[in-house]
Amino acid sequence: MAKAESTTKTPRQQMADALRADIVGGRYSPGEQLPSQRQLAAEYGVAQNTAGEAVRLLQLEGLLDNPVKSRPRVRARRTLLRLGAERYSNHLRETTGLSPFRAEVAKQGKTARVDCTSITKVDIPADVAERLGASPETKVVRRENWYYSDDEPVQMGVTYIPWETVEGSPLADSAKLGQGSLYARLEERGHRITSIREEISSRMPSPEEVESLHIPIGTPVIEVIHTSLDQEREPFEVTRFVMRADITGLDYRITIED
């Protein structure tokens, strides 16, 4: 039984350290519910309110979930890898008929779902215009998608494509893009993806992202700004992804330039 040791730390910090060590050490398994606050207080030799504060600290770290009406559980680490350049492989898309996300999730033995929640014609955002080398007067289609792995929300993405590229095609107004999805339809419009640029950063989520992506308290998000380049090395599509950092990993293979 781990006990909170006497240090310069506060009692709640001491108990949080001890409980964290027990979780990492395997005493409490992923998905296992913690004992009651009263039991934890007795076990770690602290007051009940101190036990509650210690649990709260580990919830802020993302180590425990934050249920409304039940005792916290140890969060399971179900990492979904983003497979970098491999996910955009033309060969993979042509042989499977799947979008990058669906192929990526299937490869990892999970079930994918993608909900397209919005398709609108809008003025081009300034940062997108810069990445596409487009004028500020350019119109683009804005497609918003929410991505699920085994019915758990893992990321959202907003895609921008010049209107002149998508006009008259399903890209302009349909959530159902058919075999090969977005990149197959873009290839039909003369843009075959041959290289990508991805700018990766992290930040804390907005309240709306916390709610929509079911993000644990204190957990950051990974933001990826993806730009696709075609056979002429011209940028033709930009997508801003927001991913849950607690369950998303990045796996990239990069050719080193001379």
Image (cartoon, grey):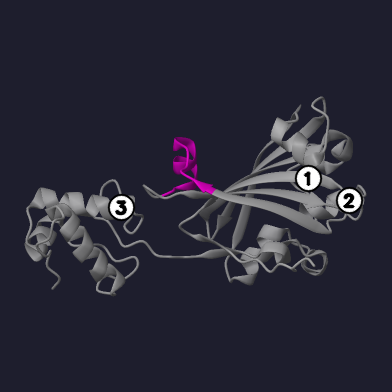
In the rendered structure, does residue 24 fall within the stretch colored magenta?
no
- The N terminus - image quarter: bottom left
Q: Residue 179: horizontal and vertical position, in percent?
A: 80, 58
In the rendered structure, does residue 205 fall within the stretch colored magenta?
yes
> Which segment is the magenta one?
202-215
Q: Which mark is residue 237?
A: 1
Q: Earlier in the sequence, mark 2 or mark 1?
A: 2
Circles 3 and 1: CB distance less than 8 Å?
Answer: no
Residue 97, placed above or below residue 130: below
* Type of the residue with mark 3: Gln
- The C terminus - image quarter: bottom right
What distance separates the C-alpha of mark 2 from that of mark 1?
9 Å
Q: Residues within 10 Å of mark 2 (few under 14, many from 20)?
A: many
Circles 2 and 3: CB distance less than 8 Å?
Answer: no
* Type of the residue with mark 2: His
Q: Residues within 10 Å of mark 1 (few under 14, many from 20)?
A: many
Q: Which mark is residue 59?
A: 3
Q: Earlier in the sequence, mark 3 or mark 1?
A: 3
Q: Residue 10: horizontal and vertical position, in percent?
A: 14, 52
Please tell me which residue is depicted at 70% across the width and 49% down the height of the picture. Answer: 226
Label 2's element? loop
Furthest-front residue in this view = 258
Q: Residue 44: horizontal and vertical position, in percent?
A: 11, 63
Examine the image and state in which quarter residue 34 appears: bottom left
Observer-nearest of 75 and 219: 219
In-image side of 7 versus 250 (left or right):
left
Please tell me which residue is depicted at 11% across the width and 48% down the height of the picture. Answer: 49
Evaluate whether residue 89 shows in this view: yes
Circles 2 and 1: CB distance less than 8 Å?
Answer: yes
Residue underneath mark 2: 191
